[in-house]
Image (tube, rainbow, N blue to C red):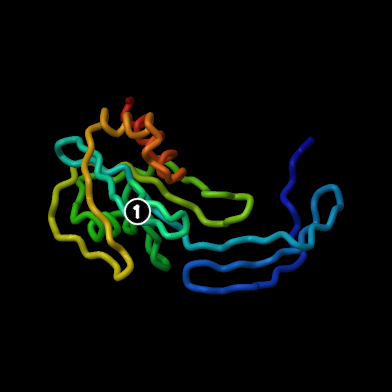
Amino acid sequence: MEILKWKKLSSKYLVQEKWATLRVDTCELQNGTIKDDYYVLEYPNWVNAIALTEENKVIMVRQYRHAADIISLEIPGGVIDGEELPEAAIKRELLEETGYSFKSAELIATLYANPATANNVTYTYLLKGGTKTAEQHLDDHEILNVEEYTIEELKQLLAEHKIDQALHCAALFYGLMKLGL
C-alpha cells in the first residue's frame, strides 16, 4: 500500500513562546479517519557538530540539562537564529560555546528529534582543523565546560553509554562513519 501524507483540515495554537510552540491539528488520514487531536510541538531548527581540533581531538561540552535533571556530555551546538544559514549557525555556536574556529565544515546529516510530535530539524556538521581563537561567549543560562577527547576515548564513551543525548549519539555515529572509523 502506498503511504500518503495526512490532509491538515485545521490547526489551533495552544502555546506560542520563543523556544516552543504547541498546536493541535485536525487531520484526515488516507483511509478517511479524522484525527481531531494531533498535538505538534514546533521548535526552532538546531545545529550540532562533530568538531575536530588540529590535533584530531573531538571537542565536547559538559553541562546541566534541567528537563532530564542530568549533567550531560554532549557535542557542541544550538539553535539557528531566525533566517541564519545552518553552516553559519554552527560556526557561531562553536565560537560562542568553545572559542574554537575551524578550517572546514561539512553537512553530514539532517535529523529529526522526534518527527511524530516535533517539526524541527537538526543539521549535523563535521568540522575539522579547529584552533582556539577566542574565549567562550556564553548566554546567561549557559554554564558549560569544554572537553577534548581522542577518537578512541570517544568510542569508549559511546560503548559505556556515557553520552545521553540521542541526537548527539546519532551525530557521532555519522561523524565516525564519515571519518571511516
Q: Residue at x 79, y 58 (%)?
A: 35
Q: In the rendered view, does 71 fall on the left or right side of 95?
A: right
Instruction: Farthest residue to the front: give it.
Output: 69
Q: In the rendered view, does 46 fall on the left or right side of 25?
A: left
> Quarter of the image holding residue 54?
top left
> Quarter of the image holding residue 27?
bottom right
State the image coordinates of residue 147 (x, y, percent, origin top left).
Answer: 22, 46
Q: Nearer the viewer, residue 98 or 107?
A: 98
- In the rendered image of this protein, does residue 102 appear above or below residue 173? below
Q: Nearer the viewer, residue 94 or 164?
A: 164
Q: Given the image, on which type of amino acid does mark 1 rest? A: Gly
Instruction: Farthest residue to the right: give it.
Output: 32
Assign a secondary structure to mark 1.
strand
Q: Nearer the viewer, residue 90 or 118?
A: 118
Quadrant assignment for the C terminus? top left
State the image coordinates of residue 33 (x, y, percent, origin top left).
Answer: 85, 53
On the image, numbered disc 1 is attached to which residue? Answer: 77
Q: In the rendered view, does 8 fall on the left or right side of 132?
A: right
- In the rendered image of this protein, does residue 1 appear above or below residue 20? above
Quadrant assignment for the N terminus? top right
Q: Which residue is drawn at 70% across and 68% down?
A: 11
Q: Nearer the viewer, residue 6 or 17?
A: 17
- In the rendered image of this protein, does residue 135 appear above or below residue 156? below
User: How many discs mark residues in the rendered view?
Assistant: 1
Q: Which residue is drawn at 59% across and 61% down?
A: 41
State the image coordinates of residue 79 (x, y, percent, origin top left).
Answer: 40, 61
| Circle 1 Cα neighbour tier, 10 Å, few/some/many (<14 / 14–19 / ≥20) | many
